[in-house]
Image (cartoon, rainbow, N blue to C red):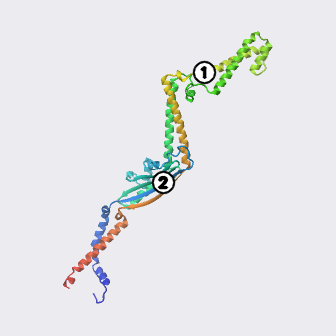
Amino acid sequence: MPPGTSGLERDLNLVRRRAWLFIPFAILGILAALFVGRATGDSNAVASLTLDTTVHDLVAGGDRGLRIFEAQEMTSDDRFRQKVKDAIGDQDFDFGRFAISLSPISVADGISRGILTVSITDPDKASAEKYRQAFVDVFQSEYVNEEGLYRQKFLERRVKVAEDNQVEYLKAYSALKASVPASIAVDAYLETRGNSTPSTASNEALARLQVELAQVDATLAAAAGASPAALAAAASSLLGQPVAAADAQAALTLKRAALAAATASFSKSATTIAESQLNAEQLRLLDTARGLRQVKEESYIRLANAQVAVQSAESHVDASYSFSGGLAGSLLGRIAVALAVTIVFGLVAIYTLEWLSPARTSK
C-alpha cells in the first residue's frame, strides 16, 4: 500500500481483492436460509376478538342463546367450518389446526362480553396469517350480521324445541282421545282440572234452555183447562210473536220439541262427568297431555321472545393481531439469514486468508 493510506482504504481494497471468497458463503447462506425455519420453529399467528352483544328490547329469557358461550360454540358448527374453508380456498384444510379459547368478561340479562382468542401455527408465516385472517373475516360476518350464523343457530334451536314439543303433545292428545268415550269432550278436560264441568257461560246457556222448556211444559199442562184465548195469549208470550187461538197448541208442541232437542244436544257436547270416573290409564294420559300442552305453549312463547331479541340485538367485534416464532421462515427472514451468513463468514475468511498470506508471514 502507498504511504499515507488510511485503514479504511486498506480494508476496502482487501475486500475488493478477495471478494470471490463471498461466493461460497453466499451459497452456504442460501442453504441456511432454506432450512433455518425448521430450527427456529413454526410461525404462530394469533387474533384476539373482543366480542360484545347487547339486546336492547329484552324479553324474559329472550337472550339466553345470544350469550358469549354460544359465540364460541358457533365455531364448531359444520356450516361455519365450511365457510372458513371456502375463504381459505382449500376444501381439505384441517380446521382442527385452529386453537380457540374463550375468556368471558360479563354475562347478564341483555349483555354478553368476552374475548375469543384464535391461533394457528404453520411453517410459513404468510400462510399462518392467511388462515388466521380467513377465520376472523368469517367470524366477524357471522357474529355481527342479523342473518349470520350466530343468530340463526339461536333461532333454529328455539324452533326445533317448539316443534318437537308440538309433536309430543299431539301424540299424547291422540292417545288420550282414543282412550275415552266419544261422548266425553277431551278439549274441555284439558282446559280444567279436578271436576270437569262446563264453563259459567255454558251453564247459563243450558239453564236458559231448561227454563224455557219448563215454561212450555207448564203451559201445555194447563192447556186442558184453559180457554183458547188464554192459551193463545200464553203461547204468544212464550214464542215472542202473535199466535192464533187455533194454532196455539201446535205451536207450543213444536217449540217444546225444539227446546228438548237443543237441551239434549247441549248436554251431550258438554263435559259433565268428574275426573274421578276416569280410570288410571285415562288419568295418566290426561295429565301427560295437559303437561305437554303447557310445555308446547311455553316453547312457542320463548321462540317469539327469541325473535324479538334477535331483531333488537347489536353486536360488535374488535380484532387485534399478534405474531410469534418462525421469523426466519418468512421471506425477509430468509433474506436476512442469507446476507448475514454471506457477509459474516465471507469477511472472516478474507481476513483469515490475509493474515495467513505469505507476504504477511515474510514480514
Specify whether 14 is left or right of 83: left
Q: Residue furthest top?
A: 225
Measuring from the top left, give residue 11's x and y in whole percent: 30, 81
Q: Secondary structure at mark 1?
A: helix
Q: Which residue occupies the foreground of this view, 277 or 4? A: 277
Identity of the amino acid at label 2? Leu
Specify whether 273 is left or right of 16: right
Residue 273, picture quadrant:
top right
Measure the alpha-carbon separation of dots 2 and 1: 62 Å
Measuring from the top left, give residue 242's x and y in whole percent: 79, 20
Task: Give the foreground label among 2 and 1.
Answer: 2
Reading the image, the residue beneath label 1 is: 268
Q: Is residue 11 visible?
A: yes
Q: Which residue occupies the foreground of this view, 275 or 341? A: 275
Q: Which mark is residue 302?
A: none
Specify whether 216 is left or right of 302: right
Q: Is residue 253 visible?
A: no
Reading the image, the residue beneath label 2 is: 51
Numbered circles on residues, count: 2
Q: Which residue occupies the foreground of this view, 330 or 172? A: 172
Q: Residue furthest right?
A: 229
Measuring from the top left, give residue 135's x and y in whole percent: 43, 55
Up the image or down, 59 lies above or below 333; here it is: above
Residue 40, picture quadrant:
bottom left
Which comes before the other along the chain, label 2 or label 1? 2
Up the image or down, 224 lies above or below 347; here it is: above
Up the image or down, 226 lies above or below 34; here it is: above
Measuring from the top left, give residue 143's x and y in whole percent: 49, 52
